[in-house]
Amino acid sequence: MDSILVTGGNPLNGEIPIAGAKNACLTLMPATLLSEEPLTLTNAPRLSDIRTMTRLLESLGAEVTALNEGRVLAMSSHGAISTWADYDIVRKMRASILVLGPLLARFGHAEVSLPGGCSIGARPVDLHLKAMEALGAEMDLRDGYVYAKAPAGGLKGGIVDFPLVSVGATENALLAAVLAKGTTVLKNAAREPEIVDLVQCLRKMGAQIEGEGSSEITIQGVDRLGGATHGVVTDRIELGTYMLAPAICGGEVTCLGGRIDLLSAFCEKLDAAGISVTEGPRGLTVARKNGRVRAVDVVTEPFPGFPTDLQAQMMALMCTAEGTSVLEEKIFENRFMHAPELMRMGARIEVQGGHATVTGVERLRGAPVMATDLRASVSLILAGLAAEGETLVSRVYHLDRGYENVEQKLSALGARIERVKDA
Ligand SMILES: CC(=O)N[C@H]1[C@@H](OP(=O)(O)OP(=O)(O)OC[C@H]2O[C@@H](n3ccc(=O)[nH]c3=O)[C@H](O)[C@@H]2O)O[C@H](CO)[C@@H](O)[C@@H]1O
Ligand SMILES: C=C(OP(=O)(O)O)C(=O)O
């Protein structure tokens, strides 16, 4: 397993390109299963999660061709498609469960292994299953697999009232309801930009959907969907991560393609911490000219609230802030695994249940640390960039799921960072 070696202390300056969103691309790719005609995605990120979804779609019989060094994914599901999504692939990634909705909608049944993913909480899939039931499907859970069967004549539109906001369950419900007979209403739906992106793509394929970006989405099922070409929305989590780099290290960085509307709650917190964020035609420019940042409290919430996927990185910033901040994690019950690692670098953090209290110190010190999940990995890299001396972040395979060329991108800003290959 590779490690990343960071030597801290350099301010960061320059421009950094932001890729297409992992979490949007992972929900757009299964949409190819809904149609015989080709679906082409542009602005795709080059990540191991995308390769895992590619393998999963190929195992089902879809064709996925990566063009332009992986930036373009040309997909087609016109041949014989299998409805069996095998444990060996599905276990690698949470988003694999998103093949359930399209397979069930188009073929009337699906057999999908229960997924894996970052171990940041229990992460059940009950809401996904309930959504399929609301569309008339019979669901059975056996031997680690979900066996789903649509009624004779296919899925039927229905009301899906989510008891809590789930990004994945909203996506799966959308991917199923587009081919159901009649009208489906999703209540308490997720409002994330990735949902809006999925709806925009499905609409290009011929789906009839209204209300994306609000908590009620209405879908009028259609008999068939066609092909489309769609550009993946900017990765707001990669964007927020790299916005934090100059915030932590000092300097001025423009994140190309960044927009405030993707991250308004996060930008408000940066402003309160004393970091300047300005939006221009090419992206967002972030600057911390001098002095320590101020401590701010953060509560993670579904969009448009502060994203849970930026909580670990924000904690890294708060470690050297002036004052004490409380970070409350309301989405996942086990998402503070970066805290003990940051403490190895001299951070003062106390975790109690869903709250982490961080008292800022003047300076972190480099240390060997271990990455436990995707966003935890990158928070340790950010902390290492600000720390005195060397930080060796081990087990970075999580990082490669969500960040492409992290060493090259940060080096171009003046960071001292390199990958250490496992012997
Ligand atoms: C691939 C992808 O897009 N991943 C993102 C997606 O994950 P994911 O779609 O898995 O996250 P959800 O929005 O579904 O999870 C929100 C909460 O609902 C719970 N829940 C979810 C489904 C369910 O059937 N039952 C249930 O109880 C979860 O355990 C969690 O506590 O949204 C999360 C929340 O913004 C992000 O952190 C992930 O990066
Ligand atoms: C938690 C994440 O990913 P996943 O849902 O795929 O585990 C993430 O992107 O931060």
Image (cartoon, grey):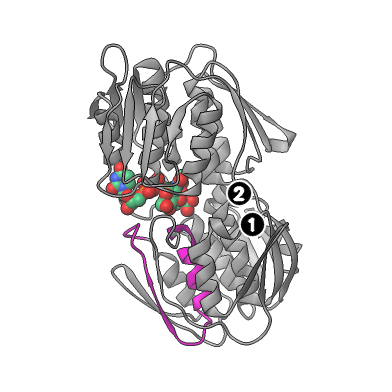
Residue placed most toward the observer, 36 or 197: 197
Residue placed most toward the observer, 347 or 161: 161
Q: Which residue is mark 2?
A: 234
User: Where is residue 49 drawn, in percent x and y?
Assistant: 54, 41
Q: Which residue is mark 1?
A: 258
Q: Residue at x 53, y 41 (%)?
A: 197
- Amino acid type, mark 1: Gly
Taking the image as drawn, is residue 403 in sight? yes
- Amino acid type, mark 2: Thr
Say whether residue 64 is magenta: no
Q: Residue at x 75, y 69 (%)?
A: 414
Q: Is residue 191 above or below residue 203?
A: below
The range drawn in magenta is: 308-334
Mark closest to the chain's N terminus, 1 or 2: 2
- Badge 1 local density, few (<14 within 10 Å), some, or many (20+)? many
User: Where is residue 40 drawn, in percent x and y?
Assistant: 63, 28
Element on which disc 1 rests: loop
